[in-house]
Image: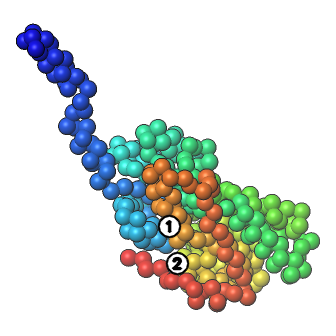
Amino acid sequence: MDLRIMRKIIIILLFLITFYLPSPAFFNTKVAARTRPIVIAIVPKSLDNPVFIDAKEAAELTARRLNVVVEWVGPFKVDVDAQIRIVEGLIRRKVDGIAISCSDGERLREVIDKAVDAGIKVATMDADAPGSRRLFYCGTDNYRAGLACGEAMVRIVTKKGKADKELNTAILTGGLTAHNLNERIQGFKSATANRIKLNYQALLTCDDDTTTATKEVEAYIKKHPETEVLFFAGGWAFFGPSESMPLYYDWCQKGGIAVSMDTFYPVLQAAEKGFVQSLVGQDFRKMGEFTVSYLVCAIKDLPIPSTFIDTGLELADQTNFTQLLQTKKPWDIK
């Protein structure tokens, strides 16, 4: 072969190798992508709220079973600005998945969408951000839970012969911007409307904090002993020792009517003592398990069954408080 032709062939081959063969960095990236464990960050509303104990335990057990890493990161107290900063940090770290219990779904919408744009699979659990581009919400059907609470209230009031009497009513909620809590209140009001006469006097807030909830209820009953009905959109007031609510307990003994969300161990204990007549519970273990499982599916480009993963409801009243209590575990708070 002519020497000049050979030189031209060699030059062309070198050109092709230089511009079309992937660099070593490309291969290293591919290897890293195959071998690095999947990382999922779960961002609760706050770290001081014991309702997430079961969800955290179930999420970590599921992560071990699926050989992925779960990080539990959130503000100590309910703080939507802190949640936003945490999610922004997770975006910079390029985690694979994020699950958020939204203290303010509307304010978190932008950072959720930012994470989605960055290629991160994002879900909500416990408290949704329905206006966002999250993949799915895993948790309680909160409107249906509110309806169940309202139905229980109608039964109790009717049984006491007070269906036609106007009853002074107060509601305790966590935060005013929490989508899940507002849905419960809407459901409660829908179920009771035109069936019993609830005269709503106050909407108390506690930021999902046990101590604040107890203080709010005690202070309100002291100032308004004429109150006849209380609806607790969450069981925060019953997470602590029952001895911390002497005025409320006396109010119950004098005929006060109360219905609450949640069937955790301390809430059922309080119900047994007469602090509440009916409860509607949530399954936080399923929230933790299903959220991790379906985020892993999404990260692996496998299908997920729905944009709403319903974890169900548990109904409790004086006929089964004791029975249900035997199925629960006391919280191990360290």
Q: Quadrant of residue 199?
A: bottom right
Q: Residue furthest right?
A: 164
Q: Nearer the viewer, residue 66 or 183?
A: 66
Q: Would residue 4 appear left or right of 215 to someone viewing this image?
A: left
In the rendered structure, the answer to whether residue 92 lies left or right of residue 203 reads left
Label 1 element class: helix
Q: Which mark is residue 319?
A: none
Q: Residue at x 54, y 76 (%)?
A: 239
State the residue in front, 157 or 24.
Answer: 24
Specify the quadrant of the image occupied by residue 144: bottom right
Q: Position of residue 24 (x, y in %)?
A: 19, 37
User: Crowdedness of circle 1 by 10 Å Cα count: few (<14), some, many (20+)?
Assistant: many
> Mark 2: few, some, or many residues within 10 Å (few <14, many ≥20)?
some
Q: Which residue is mark 1?
A: 289
Please name the residue that numbered disc 2 is placed on. Answer: 240
**Inter-mark Cα distance, 1 to 2:** 26 Å
